[in-house]
Amino acid sequence: MSTNRWVLVTGASSGIGSDFARVFAREGYSLLITARSRDRLDALAQELRREHSALVRVFPCDLSLSGAAKALVRALEEEQIEVEVLVNNAGVGLLGPFVELDAEKQSEMIHLNVLALTELTRLLAPAMVRRGSGGILNIGSTAAFQPGPLMAVYFATKAYVLSFSAALQEELSATGVTVTCLCPGPVDTPFLATARAADAKLTRWRKPMKSLIVAEEGYQALQRGATCRVTGRLNRWMAFSTRFAPLRVAAKVAKNLLQP
Ligand SMILES: NC(=O)c1ccc[n+]([C@@H]2O[C@H](COP(=O)([O-])OP(=O)(O)OC[C@H]3O[C@@H](n4cnc5c(N)ncnc54)[C@H](OP(=O)(O)O)[C@@H]3O)[C@@H](O)[C@H]2O)c1
């Protein structure tokens, strides 16, 4: 059995996930990094070995496919790797009217953002509970706090991530395992372009945060065992203020901010 402190970071080939890998490597963790792009994972692994002398293993996989989470965990078990921290970061978004967006892409989004995150948690949390220690960091979004017309499915997946994480944090409160949901607002990563949201008012309105700052905040929140951390003061204020708005009003405001 390995004596390393292993962290599994999904979506590590880019953006916030790559920066999570950098932060955990700097803090002395051994890294299990996964995403679809093997070349970018290999390049990151080389960087982490060079810059932080980190032990890094690369597991390319498409987590939007049925059975992928199970296969990934099986591969870790075959190598007798015990995951101390799970960072469920991989996620995609898609902007556009619900009835016009590609239905298959919407299903893949739900599979990746919701199902893979849930399955990985279900597969890895029991061993953490048995050991009496461990941490799960789920990447939600400020999208979790209100409905998101024009990004209806994405916002709903993030509402799931927040609700699921907070519920599990309470269920596991006496076990030594913590569950933290990190909720960033817009972040400067390829996500916004991939989601076709780069021209949304919300994105143009103010400068997206740097992904390294977001990853640092996530790491600190995990260390504190926080239930939820919204990054950035303005984002925290906006997330809080949605509590006082009727759902219909919150949806109208979000729709306005998602338009060009
Ligand atoms: N950027 C923002 O404004 C923002 C705001 C709030 C929340 N978030 C959340 O932050 C998380 C990270 O996003 P990011 O901003 O860092 O975006 P990003 O740079 O586009 O990174 C997304 C990561 O997910 C991986 N991924 C995508 N589809 C996948 C699949 N089918 N299977 C496995 N991995 C897959 C990508 O790698 P491959 O393409 O190599 O598979 C990539 O590593 C997401 O959950 C996102 O919802 C982002």
Image (tube, grey):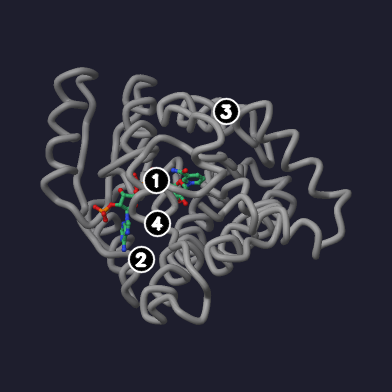
Residue 34 image point, x, y percent: 27, 50
How many residues crowd around disc 2 within 10 Å: few (fewer than 14), some, or many (20 or more)? many
Residue 220 x %, y %: 56, 25
Q: Mark 2 — residue?
A: 69
- Determine which residue is flagged by label 4: 195
- Disc 4 residue type? Ala
Q: Is residue 177 among what the camera can see?
A: no
Q: Amino acid at mark 1?
A: Val
Secondary structure under tag 4 reads loop
Q: Is residue 136 above or below residue 23?
A: below
Secondary structure of the residue carrying numbered label 1: strand
Does the beta carbon at disc 4 come under 8 Å from ligand 1?
A: no
**Residue 223 disc label:** 3
| Front: mark 1 or 3 | 3
Q: Is 170 located above or below residue 101 in the figure?
A: above
Q: CA distance from mark 2 to mark 1?
A: 14 Å
Q: Residue furthest front?
A: 260
Mark sitting on residue 83: 1
Q: Vertically, is 153 above or below 48?
A: below
Q: Is residue 35 left or right of residue 40?
A: right
- Which residue is drawn at the image coordinates 39% and 46% (left, top)? 83
90 or 101: nearer the eye? 101
Q: In whole angstroms, how far apart are the C-alphas of marks 2 and 3?
A: 25 Å
Residue 20, given in percent of the width and then of the height, sits at 39, 33
All told, the count of numbered labels is 4
Image point 56% across, 54% down: which residue?
Answer: 258
Front residue of 220/70: it is 220
Q: Is residue 46 left or right of residue 93?
A: left
Q: Residues within 10 Å of mark 3 (few under 14, many from 20)?
A: few
Q: Nearer the viewer, mark 4 or mark 1?
A: 4
